């Protein structure tokens, strides 16, 4: 009888632990690896525009990004930044001011809000371009899961590659059994704790801390403002803006 009672208590504690780990707030540190990037003006053949981009990469600094989730829905955003790219209506190009813009903040998501609802297999990215707000409907991510493992922030994680784009690597942990991740990277059988994206200029998301007791989970809401369009429609719309 005592053995049965202990087994029931253990099962209850295990259930409560797993439940508590299906909601929370993840803080990621987003960085750009700069070691493999040439420095501005090192190559005399570089154009002025290329040197401007290299300058932005070399002067980029880490930023924090946040994923708030429960077992079915999540929202992702980047820390607020007062320095944002300016839009020049004269020539239809985004002006990246080297002295003010943090490229890491832009690549991490900028002002965009990513929202996922797995009960509807639904992901959107609410973004603003030139004063026009759009909600871009995300396509499902497909992954190739490997047996390679490593420990990230105390959790055993498995490596996965995004199908059709092996420049995107994800480390996820089945110990937190939700399908969420940063910036629309999701769909794996466990929370994504680390993302590596790119080849020459690598952008990395790595978990800094996880708060399983945050009250912010109760405030997750789908962004309302903006027309819903597909990724392909957004690309066409962007090209039409650049031709203005």
Image (cartoon, rainbow, N blue to C red):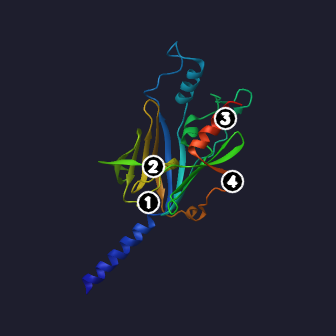
Q: Which of marks 1 and 2 is in front?
A: 2
Residue 50 at what x, y percent from top left?
A: 56, 22
The number of numbered discs placed on residues in the rendered structure image is 4
Give the class, few, some or many, for how many residues have Cα within 10 Å of label 3's Cα (few <14, many ≥20).
Answer: few
Quarter of the image with the C terminus is top right
Left or right placement of residue 89 versus residue 144 in this view: right
Toward which corner of the image does residue 47 lie, by quadrant?
Answer: top right
Please say if 152 is above or below 60: below
Whether the residues at callouts 4 and 2 have beta carbons within 8 Å, the answer is no
Q: Earlier in the sequence, mark 1 or mark 2?
A: 2
Q: Distance between the residues labelled 4 and 2?
A: 25 Å
Give the class, few, some or many, for how many residues have Cα within 10 Å of label 2's Cα (few <14, many ≥20).
Answer: few
The residue that mark 3 highlights is: 240
The residue that mark 2 highlights is: 141
Left or right placement of residue 79 versus residue 226 in this view: left
SS of the residue under disc 4:
loop
Whether the residues at callouts 1 and 4 have beta carbons within 8 Å, the answer is no
Q: Residue at x 68, y 47 (%)?
A: 133
Give the class, few, some or many, for how many residues have Cα within 10 Å of label 1's Cα (few <14, many ≥20).
Answer: many
Whether the residues at callouts 3 and 1 have beta carbons within 8 Å, the answer is no
Q: Distance between the residues labelled 1 and 2?
A: 15 Å
Relative to the observer, which residue lies in front, 236 or 104?
236
Residue 233 at what x, y percent from top left?
A: 60, 43
SS of the residue under disc 3:
helix
Given the current orientation, which residue lies at the most extreme right position? 90
Q: Which of marks 3 and 4 is nearer the N terminus?
A: 4
Q: Nearer the viewer, mark 3 or mark 1?
A: 3
Give the class, few, some or many, for how many residues have Cα within 10 Å of label 4's Cα (few <14, many ≥20).
Answer: few
Given the current orientation, which residue lies at the most extreme bottom position? 1
Residue 149 at what x, y percent from top left?
A: 31, 48
């Amino acid at each position: 009888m005592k053995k049965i009672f202990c087994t029931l208590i253990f099962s209850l504690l295990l259930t409560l632990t797993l439940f508590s780990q299906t909601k929370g707030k993840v803080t990621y540190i987003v960085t750009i690896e700069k070691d493999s990037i040439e420095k501005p003006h090192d190559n005399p053949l570089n154009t002025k525009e290329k040197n401007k981009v290299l300058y932005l990469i070399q002067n980029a600094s880490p930023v924090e990004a946040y994923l708030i989730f429960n077992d079915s829905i999540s929202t992702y955003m980047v820390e607020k930044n007062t320095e944002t790219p300016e839009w020049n209506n004269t020539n239809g190009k985004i002006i990246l001011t080297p002295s003010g813009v943090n490229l890491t903040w832009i690549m991490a998501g900028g002002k965009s809000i990513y929202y996922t609802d797995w009960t509807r297999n639904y992901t959107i990215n609410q973004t603003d371009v030139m004063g026009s707000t759009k909600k871009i409907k995300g396509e499902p991510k497909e992954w190739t899961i490997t047996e390679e493992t490593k420990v990230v922030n105390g959790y055993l994680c498995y490596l996965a590659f995004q199908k059709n784009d092996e420049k995107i690597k994800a480390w996820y942990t089945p110990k937190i059994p939700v399908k969420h991740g940063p910036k629309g990277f999701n769909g794996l059988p466990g929370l994504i704790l680390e993302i590596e994206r790119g080849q020459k200029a690598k952008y990395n998301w790595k978990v800094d801390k996880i708060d399983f007791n945050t009250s912010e989970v109760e405030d997750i809401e789908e962004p309302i403002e903006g027309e819903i369009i597909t990724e392909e429609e957004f690309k066409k719309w962007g090209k039409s803006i650049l031709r203005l």
